[in-house]
Amino acid sequence: MRTSIRVAAILAAVALALGTAACSSGGGASSGPVNLTYWTWAPNMDKVAAIWNKSHPDIHVTVNKQDGGDAAVTKLLTAIKAGSGAPDVMQAEYQKLPTLVSANALADISGDGGSAAKKEFTSSAWNAVTLGGSALYAIPQDTGPMMFYYRTDIFSKLGLTVPKTWDEYAADAKAIHAADPTQYLGTFSSGDPGWFSGLTQQAGASWWSISGKAWGVNVDSAAAQKVAKYWGDLVQEGVIDNNPMYTPAWNAALNTGKQVGWVSAVWGPGVLAGNAADTKGKWAAAPLPQWNASSPSDGNWGGSSTGVTTQSKHPKEATEFAVWLNTNPTAIKALVADAAIYPADVNATKIALTTPPDFFSTQSDFYDIAAAASKTVAPFTYGPNVNVAYSAYTDEFAKAAQSKDSAQFLTALSNVQTTTRADLVKSGFTVK
Amino acid sequence: MTSPAVATSPRIAPSSASRRRATRVQRVAIPYTMLAPAIVLFVLFMAAPILYTVVLSFQTVRVSGLGLGAADKKLIFAGLDNYISALSDPQFVASVVRVLAYGAILIPVMLGLALVFALLLDSRRSRATKFSRVAIFLPYAVPAVISSLLWGFLYLPGISPVVYILNALHISAPNILEPNLVIFAIANIALWGGVGFNMIVIYTALRAIPSDIYEAARIDGATESQIAWRIKVPIILPSLIMTGLFSIIATLQVFSEPTTLRPLTNSLSTSWTPLMKVYRDAFIRNDIYSAAATSVVIALGTFALSFVFLRIVQRRAFGQEDS
């Protein structure tokens, strides 16, 4: 068994090396059209690129489908280290940008015509791609404002109202679990650090900060402690499930009604349509419950941008494509229709998001809720070692969730803080 | 492949002295020429990466300031820093202890079952041996990732048919993915996949034993189980040692099963086994240097353990052949 795995791994590595070498070889500067390669994991992106290729005969974009955000970043960093093999254009999640910039993988495109796109985006989205400085490392593509999904039939059967605050959410969770001990309003997922950081973002936390020439690490802030304790208490009480999301068991629970609600983001309908097809028509979307109902706030779970790599020989053309892809009305319509994403462009609601997603076809205000949520997203700074913090989260909060002890949730948060800070210090970053 | 000696012989110069020189050159050159592909492959794909890993393990990247520019990063010589932090990391030590416990559970059961199956298949009274052999061997052909997914579905309490049936019979099933039991869950996957391979190795050794030994034993009045334990097992001991050694190495390198099961449960950390820690450091934390140091430590540890194991069992197994 060992040998076969090793052989397979070597074959895969060789295939990968050959594959990436092959795609980067295009792009001769002299004559003919400029060839750009584009790494993305969003579905049907080749259809969107085809629209570009039709209208821009002198710049040809080839889409290279990736497995996902983490895999693409690993591949890109390897290519950067190797000195060749990186694409021209690259989809990158917001939380990966500081890591990629720190590895000198993404080019500053502020001089290549990228900055003109600023007016199309919210300040929080723009802040994420500039890292708060004067350089521009990517064009925002999609955002993931968090939302709350729930089963209307079960809520009305139990006479519950949609929770507007987290206190009401806790009360509903208790009522649902009391009525049927196999049912939960949600789960605390140790497998989804982006979910938890989004929830702390809503409460006012920002895990990193930049002051002058120094990083600050504030994972263990009062706001984040409030969120950790809140979920820890619910898990300790047993009214919320403690198993991770995105497992076959969780998928089945959504479909059979054992999971009655889902604290998620604007892209939730796609997941629900795939995992809980039998429950179509029984779900509704609502704004995320609030800590303070009078001043609504929100967090992001997911979202990505389009960057140009430092290995691109045509940064100007690549930037032109990245701007077109994320701000051109035709492109945005295609992004929504084909790639099923929620564009970061502030005009997208008008241009393309006129009908609700298929799984929520009866809820005509779906994108109004999303747009309202998007406007209240709190500022959040990602650091250069998000990967370390996130992997520490999965380890520490797995232990905490398993223990079903609220105090352990606070210990976990403090351990993530320690690990994240120690990693920055060890690498030599100036840390406050 | 035709022999190059035959092909080149007509071209040898007529003088006997030069001929002698030519044959001497040939005598040296031909073996190396024939070995060349193997040597080149070995150097390119084994020696060079190993050397590179060792080089990496003595380096580290030093960042200054915010680390957001190319100029803010420098590759420096780290000395033994990476090794010291690897060996003093409590997570690494815990993962090594865990893997040793895992091996202590898995290896005796796996080799025991493989031996029993092989002896049963080799026994004169066995029926349907061909079918059984294939059936026991078949799980080995399933990649570890696939088998881990299959078993994951059987383990998850929410969807497991096993748990469903037990609950229907009013038996409360333990959650095998709990932190204390998950090691058995993973050992079980490796057991399911590994018994067949080891059985085939042992069975092949059994088939190579000349049958006149058994006839002699039967004439002396030995029963089938006496033949098995007093004759067959001692003769195939070298095969058992070899499978044991392979199993020890495979145990230290366990990776696919826990990595595949990890997203399904809260019980498996990113450093559950030493190799998982290496993977995390290299590809999640992007710290390839400390990952390289940990890899070297694991390789040396595996080497030492294999050496000690062979040292202990060698005399018993190969003693007769050496004398």
Image (spheres, rainbow, N blue to C red):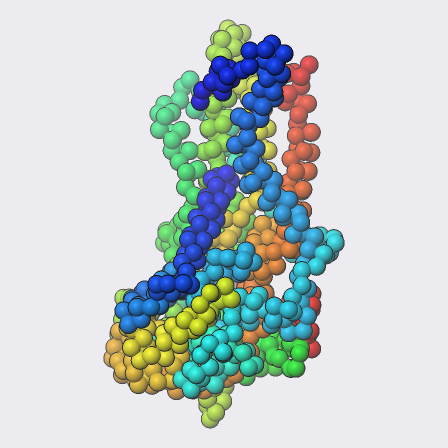
Q: Residue at x 31, y 80 (%)?
A: A329
Along the horizontal axis of the image, is B81 left or right of A17?
right
Q: Locate the N terminus of chain B by quadrant.
A: top left
**B170 sits to left or right of B100:** left
Is residue B128 at all visible to an observer of this figure? yes
Q: Position of residue A148 (x, y in %)?
A: 40, 78
On the question of residue B190 being in view, the answer is no
* x 69%, y 14%: residue: B323
Tell me how many marks there are.
0
Find residue B84 and report its horizontal and vertical position in percent.
73, 54
- The front one of A27 and A186 is A27
Where A395 sits versus B139, above or below? below
Q: Is residue A137 above or below residue B222?
A: below
Residue at far bottom of view: A294
Q: Please state if B148 lies on the left or on the right of A200 as rendered.
A: left
> Looking at the picture, does residue A293 appear above or below residue A42?
below
Viewer-nearest residue: A285 or A20: A20
Judge left or right: residue B247 versus residue A55: right
* Residue at figure coordinates x 58%, y 23% from the top left: B29
Give the residue at x 32% y 64%. Answer: A46
Q: Quadrant of residue B299?
A: top right
Q: Could you say where residue B168 lies in the image, as x and y percent from the top left?
A: 36, 54
Name the one closer to the observer, B271 or A242. Answer: B271
Q: Based on the displayed image, in which of its 4 quarters is residue B71 positioned?
A: bottom right
Point out residue A163 in the picture as x, y percentages from the top left corner.
41, 83
Q: Is residue B19 above or below residue A325?
A: above
